[in-house]
Image (cartoon, grey):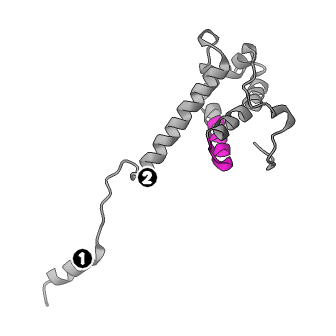
Amino acid sequence: MTDGTSKPPAQHSNAHFATTHWSIVLAAGDSSARQHTQALSALCETYWFPLYAYLRRRRYDHDRAEEYTQAFFARLLEKHGVRLADPGRGRFRYFLLAAFKNFLADEHDRAQALKRGGGRKIFSINFENAETSTRSSRPMN
């Protein structure tokens, strides 16, 4: 998503969420729409930097912010999440930010679960004792 430079492209110099026309959002959410791919591309281009900047303002380092921003958009596209946006429920930017916060919470929960062993009970297998026990329990010939 970035070209490795520290300064964002000129069109992204403002980290605020842009106003988006619902016609673009609806076309992006409808895979049968003629402009579907172009609309999805426009939404990703418009919103990746504000989401990245949102994370940087919350003290995520560059790499983590980039990783989470890319993963969020990958999941949004994979799950066709844009189709869930509804003009009757408010602005698209609020929908997107809420989805992003939910994604971050899920990532946090996943990371915590991995730190705790992924929810699995961990036990140690002592193969040295097992080998000693099998030697001593063998009948002598």
Residue 94 visible in the picture: yes
Quick one: quadrant of the C terminus? bottom left
| The stretch drawn in magenta includes residue 60 | yes
Res 31 visible: no
Who is closer to the viewer here, 139 or 72?
72
Position of 3 compared to 136: left or right? Answer: right
| Badge 2: residue crowd in 10 Å (few <14, some 14–19, many ≥20) | few
The answer to which quarter of the image holds residue 40 is: top right
Give the magenta-colored segment's residue range.
59-73
Callout 1 crowding tier (Cα within 10 Å): few <14, some 14–19, many ≥20: few
Residue 62 drawn at (x, y percent): 68, 47
Q: Residue at x 86, y 35 (%)?
A: 10
The residue under label 2 is 115
The residue at 71%/19% (across/down) is 25
Return the residue at label 1: 129
Which residue corresponds to the image point at 62% horizontal and 18% vertical from the top-left? 85
Q: Position of residue 27 (x, y in %)?
A: 72, 18
Say which amino acid is labelled 2. Answer: Lys
Going by the numbered disc 1, the residue's amino acid type is Asn
Image height of 37 relative to 137, above or below: above
Instruction: Determine the main secondary structure of the stretch shown in magenta.
Output: helix
Distance in Å between CA atoms under marks 2 and 1: 28 Å
Corner quadrant of residue 49? top right
